[in-house]
C-alpha cells in the first residue's frame, strides 16, 4: 500500500503530493498527519490518497503517524481544495489555516494533552473490608479505602501519600482521565421569551435547507435571542451549530449567553486562547463532545460533524476577511459549508454590508427584519457637534456639550462610552523648528507616540524607537506631539473627571490573556464609569447601564481614500450609537466632527440605513464598484523599487491582452501602503462581471511568479479595501 502525501513546505513549486510506502504494521487513513523523510530531513505531511501500487521505484516508507486520533475529515479536505483555488494559495497553506497551532502540519514537540490522575479500587468490596478489619491502626489507609467505597474514585492530589502502600498491596490503582483546560459546569439553563417579531423571524428560517438569510435588525432588537432559539431547534434535530462573532472582545458576552442556554455543550475557538486551550476545544469538537461552537473568523473551519446551522453575527465586519494569505472571506467559506451540509446560514447585522443587502433585495438571500428594540425601548438621541466651532473655544478634544453630558451621566451613576478609532497617545511626532517628522524607516509612515512606554511605534511592522524631544535633524528640543489617540483621551478625561473610574480598551491594553473577559466583567458589574476604546467596543456588546456614547473624531474613517469609507463610517457610528439605552434608560449620542454637513451624519442621526444604501448604490453603479462588479487586486511586491515597477507594467500588459474586453483594469499604481516592512508594493485592480478568461490568466501569472526570488505577488479576490 502507498500513500500520496502533501508535505509541510508552503512553496508553490512543492504544491503537489509525493508517494511513500505504508509499512505493513501501520494503521493509516486519508487525512492523517505523518512524519516522512524528505530531502534528508524528517518533516510532516498530510495523507491525501491511499493506493494499492505505484510505478515509482525505491519509494521511502512513512516513518510515523502523528496524532492518530485526529485527522482532517472528508469535508475539510475538500474545503481545503476550494480555499486553495479561490485564494490562489498552496494547498498545504490552506490546510494549515484550518488547523489550530498545536495540530498544524509541522514539527511540534509539545504534548498538549492534560490528564487528572484518580485512585480507584482494584479489589472486590469484601476484600477491601477484610483489609480494613485486619489493619485498624493504618488510619490514613483506612480513610482512603472508605472514601473510595463511598465515591468510587478520588483525585490523587486530594489524599495523603499512604495511597502508595495500597498500590503496592494491589488494593487500589491509578487511572488517568483526560482533562480540559476550559470547563463549564451545567447549571440551571436560562430560558428566553421571544417577542412576536423574533418568533416570526425564527418561524421563517427553514433548517433543512441551504438558504442564506440576512437578519437585518436594529441595535438592541434581540438578534442573539433569535440565534439561541434557532440553535436549540438545530440541536433538537440532532445537528450541530456554528456561531461566529467578529472580535475576541465579543466572545465573552456571547459565550456566557450560550453557556446559560447550553452549558458544557459549547466549545470556543479564537486567537486569545492558549495553544493548549485551542487543542482541548478542537478535540472536544472533533470527538463530537459538543453541539455548539462559538468563535471568531478561524472558527469557520471547526471540524463539526452533521453541521445544521451557521450564524455570522455582525456580518458587515471587515474582520471576517483574512488580510494575509490565504485571503479568504468567511462568508464564502460559510456558503461552501452550508451547501456541503445542506444547512442554512444566518447573516445578522444592524448595518449589513451593501453587497449582502443588495443580494437580499434581489432574492439571492432571504431577508428577515427586526424593526423594534426589545421592550420597545427608544433608540438614543443623536446630536452632531461641529468641532471647528469648538476649536475656537479651545476645546481641542471634548466639546462643551460632551463634557456637560458626561458630567450629568456620572451624576446619575450611569456609564459613558467614548469611541476613538486610533490607539496610542498622539498620531504624529514632529519638530516645530524644522518640520522633521518621525517616520518608520521600514514603512515610511508616521510613528505613533505611546506615552505609557515612552516609545514611538509603527503599527504596521512593529518597529519601535525611544521617544526623545531633541530633534535628530536640527538638534533643537522642539519635538511636539500632534493628533489624538485613546491613550491621550484617557489622560485628559481623568483630568476633567478625577473621581471617575476610567477603563481604556484597545489593542495595547487587551494583549494579556483574559483581559477582554476581565474588562467586560468589570463594566457589567458597574466597576467602571467611563469606557474609552477603539472599534472593538463599537459593536455587539450589551451593557444596560450605558446611557451616553461620545464619538471623539467621527472623521477618522471618512478620510480614508476607499470606496467603502462612507459605508464603514455609517456602520461604525450606528453600531457604537447602539450601545446606549439598551435597558430603556434615556440615552444620548454625541458625534464630534469637522464635517457636520456631510450627509452621512444626517443618516446616522436618523438611523437611516436604507437612505445610505440607496445613495451609495447610485455611486457604486456609476463607478463600477461592488455589488455591480467584482474586484480582484494584484499587489506586485519587491525590495527593489525598479524591479517592482517594471514587473507591474509587464503584468498589466499581459492582462490587457489576455482577459475579457468587458473587464476594467486600473493601474499599475502605488499601493495605499506603498512601502511596508522594506517591501515596495505596486497594485493592479481588475473590475469584472463575467470574465471566462480571467481565472486562467491569473493562475498563469501566479505560477510564473512562484519561481521568482526577488519579487512576489499578493492576489486578493474581492479585497475589503484598496
Image (spheres, rainbow, N blue to C red):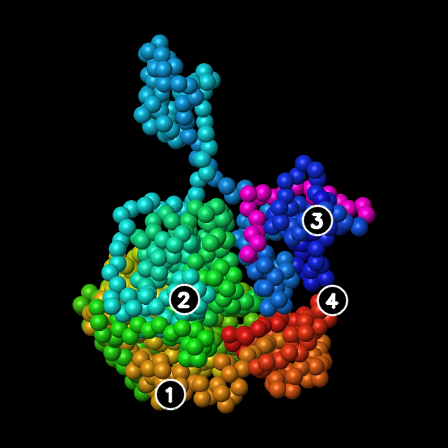
**Comes first in the chain, label 2 or label 3:** 3
Please identify the quadrant where the N terminus is shown. Answer: top right
Residue at x 57% of width, y 52% of height: 72
Which is more N-terminal, label 3 or label 1? 3
Seen in the picture, residue 569 relative to 232 is either above or below; the reply is below
Is residue 579 in sight in this rendering? no
- Residue 70 on the magenta span: yes
* Up/down of 20 relative to 676, above or below: above
Q: Which mark is residue 293?
A: none
Quarter-wise, where is residue 398 in the image? Answer: bottom left
Q: CA distance from mark 1 to mark 3?
A: 65 Å
Q: Nearer the observer, disc 1 or disc 4?
A: 4
Q: Quadrant of residue 131?
A: top left
The magenta stretch is 57-76
Sequence-first tag of 4 and 2? 2
Give the number of the mark in front: 2 or 1.
2
Q: Where is mark 1, residue-wise?
A: 598
- Could you tell which of marks 1 and 4 lies nearer the N-terminus? 1
Q: Which residue is mark 4?
A: 707
Q: Quadrant of residue 504?
A: bottom left
Residue 698 visible in the displayed image: yes
Q: Secondary structure at mark 3?
A: strand
CA gap, disc 4 and disc 2: 42 Å
Secondary structure under tag 2 reads strand
* Of labels 1 and 3, the one closer to you: 3
Q: Of marks 2 and 1, which one's residue comes earlier in the chain?
A: 2
Q: Which residue is mark 3?
A: 51
Which of the two discs, 3 and 4, labels the residue nearer the N terminus? 3
Disc 1 from disc 4: Cα separation: 49 Å
Amino acid at each position: 500500500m502507498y500513500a500520496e502525501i502533501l508535505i509541510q513546505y508552503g512553496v508553490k513549486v512543492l504544491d503537489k503530493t509525493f508517494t511513500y510506502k505504508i509499512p505493513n504494521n501501520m494503521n493509516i487513513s486519508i487525512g492523517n498527519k505523518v512524519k516522512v523523510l524528505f530531502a534528508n530531513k524528517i518533516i510532516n505531511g498530510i495523507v491525501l490518497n491511499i493506493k494499492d501500487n505505484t510505478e515509482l521505484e525505491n519509494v521511502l516508507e512513512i516513518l510515523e503517524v502523528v496524532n492518530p486520533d485526529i485527522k482532517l475529515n472528508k469535508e475539510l479536505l475538500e474545503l481545503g481544495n476550494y480555499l486553495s483555488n479561490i485564494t490562489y494559495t498552496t494547498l498545504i497553506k490552506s490546510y494549515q489555516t484550518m488547523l489550530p497551532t498545536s495540530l498544524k502540519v509541522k514539527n511540534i514537540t509539545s504534548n498538549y494533552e492534560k490528564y487528572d490522575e484518580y485512585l480507584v479500587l482494584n479489589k472486590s468490596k469484601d476484600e477491601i473490608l477484610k483489609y480494613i478489619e485486619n489493619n485498624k491502626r493504618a488510619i490514613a489507609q483506612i480513610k482512603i479505602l472508605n472514601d473510595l467505597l463511598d465515591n468510587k474514585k478520588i483525585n490523587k492530589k486530594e489524599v495523603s501519600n499512604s495511597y502508595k502502600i495500597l498500590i503496592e498491596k494491589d488494593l487500589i490503582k491509578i487511572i488517568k482521565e483526560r482533562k480540559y483546560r476550559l470547563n463549564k459546569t451545567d447549571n440551571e439553563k436560562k430560558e428566553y421569551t421571544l417577542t412576536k417579531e423574533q418568533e416570526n423571524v425564527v418561524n421563517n428560517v427553514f433548517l433543512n435547507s441551504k438558504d442564506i438569510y440576512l437578519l437585518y435588525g436594529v441595535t438592541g432588537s434581540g438578534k442573539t435571542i433569535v440565534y439561541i432559539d434557532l440553535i436549540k431547534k438545530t440541536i433538537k434535530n440532532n445537528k450541530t451549530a456554528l456561531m461566529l462573532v467578529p472580535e475576541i472582545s465579543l466572545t465573552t458576552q456571547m459565550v456566557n449567553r450560550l453557556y446559560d442556554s447550553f452549558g458544557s455543550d459549547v466549545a470556543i475557538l479564537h486567537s486569545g486562547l492558549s495553544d493548549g486551550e485551542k487543542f482541548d476545544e478542537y478535540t472536544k469538537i472533533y470527538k463530537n463532545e459538543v453541539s455548539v461552537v462559538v468563535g471568531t473568523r478561524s472558527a469557520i473551519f471547526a471540524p463539526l460533524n452533521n453541521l445544521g446551522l451557521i450564524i455570522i453575527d455582525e456580518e458587515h465586519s471587515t474582520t471576517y476577511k483574512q488580510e494575509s494569505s490565504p485571503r479568504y472571506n468567511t462568508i464564502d467559506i460559510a456558503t461552501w459549508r452550508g451547501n456541503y451540509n445542506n444547512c442554512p446560514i444566518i447573516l445578522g447585522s444592524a448595518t449589513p454590508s451593501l453587497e449582502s443587502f443588495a443580494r437580499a433585495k434581489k432574492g439571492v438571500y432571504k431577508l428577515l427584519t427586526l424593526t423594534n428594540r426589545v421592550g420597545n425601548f427608544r433608540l438614543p438621541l443623536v446630536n452632531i457637534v461641529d468641532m471647528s466651532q469648538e476649536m475656537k473655544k479651545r476645546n481641542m478634544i471634548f466639546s462643551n456639550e460632551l463634557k456637560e453630558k458626561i458630567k450629568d451621566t456620572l451624576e446619575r451613576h450611569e456609564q459613558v462610552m467614548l469611541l476613538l478609532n486610533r490607539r496610542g497617545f498622539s498620531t504624529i511626532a514632529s519638530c516645530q523648528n524644522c518640520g522633521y517628522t518621525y517616520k518608520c524607516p521600514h514603512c515610511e509612515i508616521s510613528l505613533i507616540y505611546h506615552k505609557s512606554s515612552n516609545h514611538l511605534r509603527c503599527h504596521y511592522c512593529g518597529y519601535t524607537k525611544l521617544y526623545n524631544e531633541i530633534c535628530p535633524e536640527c538638534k533643537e528640543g522642539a519635538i511636539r506631539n500632534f493628533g489624538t489617540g485613546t491613550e491621550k483621551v484617557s489622560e485628559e478625561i481623568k483630568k476633567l473627571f478625577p473621581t471617575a473610574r476610567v477603563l481604556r480598551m484597545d489593542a495595547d491594553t487587551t494583549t494579556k490573556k483574559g483581559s477582554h473577559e476581565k474588562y467586560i466583567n468589570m463594566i457589567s458589574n458597574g466597576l467602571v464609569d467611563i469606557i474609552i476604546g477603539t472599534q472593538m467596543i463599537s459593536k455587539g456588546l450589551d451593557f444596560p447601564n450605558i446611557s451616553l456614547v461620545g464619538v471623539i473624531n467621527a472623521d477618522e474613517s471618512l478620510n480614508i481614500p476607499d470606496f467603502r469609507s462612507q459605508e464603514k463610517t455609517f456602520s461604525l457610528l450606528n453600531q457604537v450609537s447602539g450601545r446606549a439605552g439598551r435597558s430603556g434608560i434615556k440615552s444620548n449620542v454625541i458625534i464630534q466632527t469637522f464635517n457636520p454637513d456631510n450627509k452621512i451624519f444626517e443618516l446616522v442621526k436618523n438611523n437611516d440605513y436604507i437612505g445610505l444604501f440607496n445613495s451609495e448604490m447610485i455611486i457604486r453603479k456609476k463607478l463600477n464598484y461592488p455589488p455591480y462588479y467584482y474586484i480582484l487586486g494584484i499587489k506586485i511586491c519587491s525590495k527593489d523599487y525598479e524591479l517592482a515597477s517594471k514587473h507591474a507594467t509587464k503584468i498589466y500588459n499581459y492582462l490587457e491582452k489576455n482577459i475579457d474586453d468587458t473587464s476594467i483594469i486600473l493601474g499599475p499604481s502605488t499601493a495605499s501602503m506603498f512601502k511596508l516592512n522594506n517591501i515596495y508594493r505596486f497594485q493592479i485592480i481588475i473590475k469584472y462581471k463575467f470574465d471566462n478568461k480571467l481565472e486562467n490568466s491569473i493562475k498563469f501569472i501566479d505560477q510564473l511568479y512562484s519561481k521568482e526570488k526577488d519579487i512576489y505577488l499578493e492576489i486578493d479576490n474581492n479585497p475589503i479595501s484598496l
